Amino acid sequence: MAELIIFDDGRGQMGPMDDLVPVFSLRTGGIRTYERIERALGQFVSGWWVDERHVTSWSASNTRPVNTLPSGSQLLCVNGRWSGCGSLPIPSPGHAVVDEENTVLAACLNPEQASHFFEHRDLPEGVESQSIAGLPIYRKAWDLLNWLSETLADDLEAEPFSPNAADRAECAGEHPVSIDDSSVVFPGVVFDTHAGPIFIGPDVTIRPNAVLVGPCWIARGSVISEGAVIRGNTVVGPHCRVGGEVGASIFQGWSNKVHDGYLGDSLVGQWVNIGAGTVTSNLLNTYGEISMRLEPTAPRQRSGRMFMGTLFGDHVKTAIGTRLMTGTVLGTGSMIATSTPPPSIVSRFAWLTDDGERRYRLDKFIDMVRLVMARRDQELAEAEEAVLVALHHSVSVDS
């Protein structure tokens, strides 16, 4: 069997969502994309290939080689922008599978061919390619939401469901509910599974009178606030604290939205804090297609979506009562404290108040990150800090 390498080809337009991590490590359903790829292929990864900006941090958090080829004679190189759903044909040695845009989805290469592929980002001579269409590929950030119903259904189907949910909460609907034995469900909680299953991972706390509507996924260590309404197609990643009304959204992990306020059709990075009363608009008054700018200097692009909320980069903070308009993008490390809605695209490390915009000072930002993480008994790793410093420097140079 060829050894598996999952690679980030850098061609996805994810806005701030992949500033600090490779695209394949984003949570795109109940689990991260690379985990779903491993499950789909039936083998664990033997190595990774990532953009240079992610080499140090990804190496520090993984035991498998990063940007160094494994020792195998045949390497199955799989694009980390494939969702892991659908049927990806496995190429034979010296062959590749490409999509309708000629993006390499998978290639079975010897080490010399693989070195050429990763250095030049194109297939070496002599490698034959087969074209397929229709696989779920993440090309733009909103594709994480476009394919969420499929990925979440796939992840829920792969989970062994426990039979004890009806003894622990009010359940309505024909789909199952799985509650880990270590989790706590308070009185008054209602699970509505008419539209899909509900998964409650380890060490989760569901506070009194919360309503959860399937399909949804609540990952390890998260807390759902009293009276929260968690609507279908919602993923709450590990160690989040979520309240108010949330629907059709993905929390990557370690983020807070404890208080009231609506969040819909949105992507929330890590270590985000959404202030009380923050609300997202996810539908234009005209009911038209939503256009977005994923980068401050990029043109607006049509998303093909009628419903689209906000993209929160990692470490974003919003003040109480913040109003976010349809299709807003908040750059990594930005701080929003305005009494009027912020612009639809906010630069990385922007500090926004009613007096205008200034750059978040690097030393102050790093101090804040350390403080926030310490409150959860976490520490900012040296490699993670280096990525933040490099990103801050690149933004300062560009501006």
Image (cartoon, rainbow, N blue to C red):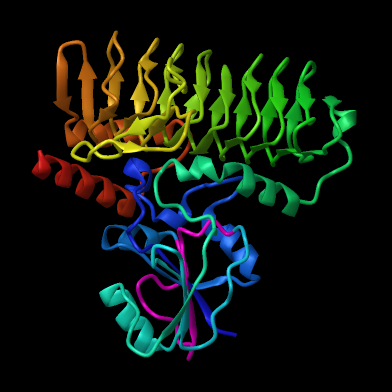
Q: In this rendering, would 275 be left or right of 33? A: left
Against 261, residue 395 (above or below) is: below
Q: Splitting the image into 4 quarters, where does residue 378 fall?
A: top left
Of helix, strand and loop, which mostly describes the magenta segment? loop
Q: Splitting the image into 4 quarters, where does residue 22 fall?
A: bottom left
Which quarter of the rendered picture does the N terminus lie within?
Answer: bottom right
Residue 100, image x and y in percent?
A: 44, 64
Is 65 included in the stretch rendered in magenta?
yes
Identified at 68% across, 29% down, the residue is 205
Identified at 83% across, 39% down, the residue is 176
Against 75, residue 278 (above or below) is: above
Against 300, residue 336 (above or below) is: above
In-front residue for pair 118/92: 92
Identified at 63% across, 47% down, the residue is 150
Identified at 66% across, 30% down, the residue is 232
Residue 101, image x and y in percent?
A: 39, 62
Residue 119, image x and y in percent?
A: 27, 76
- The magenta span reads 62-84
Does the rendering let one see residue 298?
yes
In-front residue for pair 115/107: 107
**How many numbered discs, if any?**
0
Q: In this rendering, would 228 be left or right of 194? A: left
Q: In this rendering, would 340 be left or right of 198? A: left
Is 197 included in the stretch rendered in magenta?
no
Which quarter of the rendered picture does the C terminus lie within?
Answer: top left
